[in-house]
Every structure is written in C-alpha cells, then in structure tokens.
Amino acid sequence: MAREINAIPSTKKLIINFTPNGMIPTKEMTPHVPISPGEIAADVLKAAELGASMAHIHARNPDGTPTTDPEIFADIVKRIRAVNKEIIICLTTSGRGENTFEKRSGVLRLTGDSKPDMASLTLSSLNFNRTASVNSPDMVKSLAKCMLDNGIKPELEVFDIGMINYWHYLISKGLLKPPYYVNLLLGNIACAQADLINVGLMLRELPKDTHWSLAGIGNYQLQMNSLGIVWGGGVRVGLEDNIFLDTPTRKVLATNTQMVERVVNLAKEYGREIATPREVREWLGLRSPEEI
C-alpha cells in the first residue's frame, strides 16, 4: 500500500513518558512500586515536577493485582488533576490480563475530569517471558474506533516492525489520525531486540507526523532511553519496564524518582531541553489544561 514515511522524525525538546507501575512489579519484587491510587498519583506528580510531560497509568486492586475497573482509574486521575491538570494522562487498555472489549474499553468511557487525554493501543499480539498480550485485529480496530469516537488520542505501542505495518493499515482505514505518538519498545524476548539496526528500521518506517519515544525492557531501559535522547526522540521510563537502577548487575532497586532524574540529567548533558506538557499537548492536538 502507498504510504508516507519519515526517515528519523524528531522534536527539538525531549518528551518524557513516565510509566510508574505497569502490571507486573509487585511489592514483593520491589517496595518502591506504587500500587494504591494515592501512591500512583504521588509518583506521577513527582515525575511531573521533575519534567515528565505524560504518564502511562495502570491501576491495581487493593491486593496489588491488575484491574480494568474504571472507578479505580478515575480515582487515580482525579487525585492527579486535583494538583496538576497539565500533565498528559494516558490510561492502559492492555490485553495482558482481561481480554474482552467491554473490560478493556472501560477507561475510554470515563468523562469529565476523569477522562484520559490518551489511551494505550498495542498494535498486535505478542509474548512476554511468561505471559501473552492478546490483541486480535478486531480488538485493535474496535479500540482504535472507540478512542476516535471519544476524542482520546492513542498512545501507540510498537514492539516490532510488523506492528508499524499494521499501523499504516489502520491509517488507510481511517482509524488513526495524525499527529501520532508512539512508544517503540525494544528488548522483549519475543520481539525486536534492543540494537541500532532494529531501532533504525522501525524509525525508517514510521508514518509522517509521528512523535516517538524509545523504551527498553529490563536491562535495556537505560540504553534505549539514552539513544532516544541522542537521536532526538523521546523516552519512556519508569518501574513498569525495569525495577533495577544498576542493570545488568541487578542489585540496586530503583525508585521512579531516580529513573526520571537520571533521564533529565542525561538530557542536560546532551543539551536537550525538556518538553513541557503544554508543548506536547499542542504538538499532539490535545485539549488544553483549561478545557479539563
């Protein structure tokens, strides 16, 4: 199919996408992972103070297990926005646990000051070390349409180059509209590995009008964050992708604050200014804080 492609798109300022907890880290694995709505909101607010322009949020039940309950997500969002309405809030629609459209799309029907600015959209199924993220074509298209209908910008999640091909297909069907934002996630055992060739191929295939951030799974987080800074993209950083500060030795458990501070310090070393949430909202065509 005909497609318009960017070679290596970039922004002048660094987008920091903060991922506080994900679905996997538990308090038994690390005491630093935020579980309750109050803990999650506190980490997001601290990350925003340090320079994060957006937060990619997973909710947990009181026992720490992942949940799709819109009320728990709404609680988190309201806690954040009671203090800071500027940071961009992205809520997950992950297929790693619940896999019905009704459950996964619940956060897309939140309204008022609970409505997210963005929602994650993984563009195909994939395997992790012990679990699968199941994203059938019908599910991906249904979630994309629901986001489009509700005025929620997809936060695209791409783990290999085939997902970018499917992204172009969704554009041709009118289900994704520019400008686009994507996290390129490298280093998962069953997907694209964290090396320059894979990153370069993925960047070459991105659609025009794309803002991209690099993420590394586990040991590769710092490498991919550093590459995103050097190559003019953004970064995705937080305990969702890696709980250790000293990879690959894995002896020092990190805090989210340490993760974000390290990225900010690296950006300063390379002369990259940090993008503000207002700037990123403008780039992505999101509503202003005053409209929330």
Image: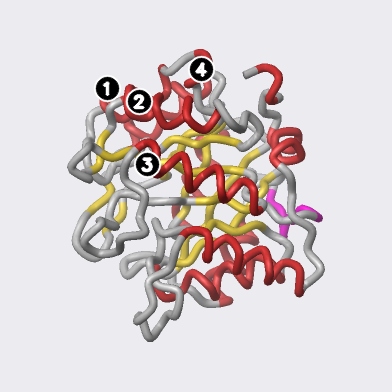
Q: Is residue 11 on the magenta stretch?
A: yes
Task: Give SS at disc 4.
Answer: loop
Q: What residue type is labelled 1?
A: Glu
Query: Of callouts 3 and 1, which one flags the residue occurring earlier in the amino acid sequence?
Result: 3
Residue 236 pos. (x, y %): 54, 56
Q: Residue at x 26, y 46 (%)?
A: 96
Task: Give SS at disc 3.
Answer: loop
Marks 4/2: CA distance?
11 Å
Q: Is residue 43 above or below residue 245?
A: above
Marks 4/1: CA distance?
15 Å
Q: Residue at x 32, y 28 (%)?
A: 72
Q: Residue 105 carries which label?
A: 2
- Decide which of 208, 216 is in the foreground and name it: 216
Q: How many labels does the image show?
A: 4
Q: Is residue 257 on the magenta stretch?
A: no
CB-based contact (under 8 Å), mark 1 and mark 2: yes
Q: Quadrant of residue 58?
A: top left
Tell me the mark number nearer the camera, choosing from 3 and 1. 3
